[in-house]
Image (tube, helix red, strand yellow):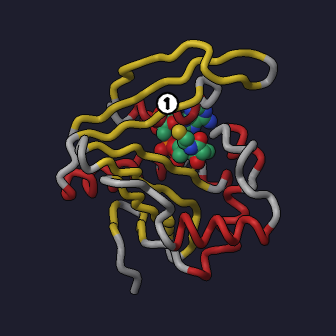
Amino acid sequence: MSIGLKGGRILLRPPREEDFEVIYRLWNDPEIYYLTDDAYWVPKSKEKFREFFKEFHLDGGRPGPGKQNAVFVIELEGKVIGDCGIDIDWRKKRGDVWLELLPEYWGRGYGKEILKILEDYARSLGLERLRAMVNGWNERSKKLFESVGWKLITEIPENGWFEGKWWPDYLFEKKL
Ligand SMILES: CC(C)(COP(=O)(O)OP(=O)(O)OC[C@H]1O[C@@H](n2cnc3c(N)ncnc32)[C@H](O)[C@@H]1OP(=O)(O)O)[C@@H](O)C(=O)NCCC(=O)NCCS
C-alpha cells in the first residue's frame, strides 16, 4: 500500500525512482510543454532529464531559504497519470500550485480532485493561500481553476508569446 494523500479516485504520493519513464513521457509531451510554456527549458534527452528528475522530483529541487517544493506523482488505481506540487514560501504562508496529467486522462474531473487534495494539504500545513499562474492560451487550465472557485486576481497583458501572438497570463488565488 502506498503512503500519500488520498481524495476521490486519486492518490498523491512522493515520486520514486521507478516513476522515471512515465514522468519523462509527461514532461516531454509537446502538447503539455507548449501549454505550460516549458518547452524551452525541459531537458529533452533521457540522460539530461534523469538529472533533472533526480534533483527536482526525488530531491525536491533547490528551493532557497524559507522555501520548499512539495512534489507528488498522481496515481489512479495504482498507475501514475501525472505529477503536481506546491512551491511553498513559508515566510508568506503561501504556495504556488502546478499540475499536469497525461493527455489521455484530461477532461474526466481528475484535475478538480487533485486541486481539492492540494488545498486540504496546504491548509493542514498552515498555509493561508494558494496561487497559480495560467498562460492565456491554456483555456482548459483557466477553466479548471475557475470551476473550483479560485479567484482571478490579476491579468498580466501580453506576457506570453504563443503561435505568433501575445497572450495574457492569469494569476488565480485560493484563500484557504
Ligand atoms: C489542466 C489540467 C490539469 C486539467 O485537468 P483535467 O482533469 O483535464 O480537468 P477536469 O476534467 O477536472 O476539468 C476541469 C474543468 O476544465 C474544463 N474543461 C474540461 N475539458 C475541457 C476542454 N476540452 N476544453 C476546455 N475546458 C475543458 C471544464 O470547465 C471543467 O470544469 P467542469 O467539469 O465544471 O465543466 C489538465 O488538462 C492538464 O494536465 N493539462 C496540461 C498541463 C497543464 O496545462 N497544466 C496546468 C498549468 S497551469
The answer to which image quadrant residue 172 occupies is: top left
Q: Write down which quadrant ligand 1 falls in.
A: top right
For the N terminus, the image quarter is bottom left
Name the side, left or right, on which 55 lies relative to 170: right
Image height of 114 relative to 139, above or below = below
Within 10 Å of disc 1 (Cα), the crowding (few <14, some 14-19, many 20+) is few
Name the side, left or right, on which 55 lies relative to 118: right
Q: Which residue is mark 1?
A: 143
Give the residue type at disc 1.
Answer: Lys
Residue at (79%, 24%) from the top-left corner? 163
Residue 175 locus on image (x, y percent): 23, 35
Residue 40 appearing in the image: yes
Towards the viewer: 81 or 94: 94
Towards the viewer: 168 or 66: 66
Name the side, left or right, on which 23 lies relative to 92: right
Name the side, left or right, on which 77 lies relative to 105: left
The residue lying furthest to the bottom in this view is 1
Residue 91 locus on image (x, y percent): 24, 46
The residue lying furthest to the top in this view is 157
The residue lying furthest to the front in this view is 65
Name the secondary structure under disc 1. Answer: helix
Label 1 CB, ligand 1: below 8 Å? yes
Residue 107 appearing in the image: no
Residue at (41%, 51%) from the top-left corner? 87
For the C terminus, the image quarter is top left
Residue at (50%, 68%) from the top-left corner? 76
Residue 89 locus on image (x, y percent): 32, 47
Residue 100 locus on image (x, y percent): 57, 51
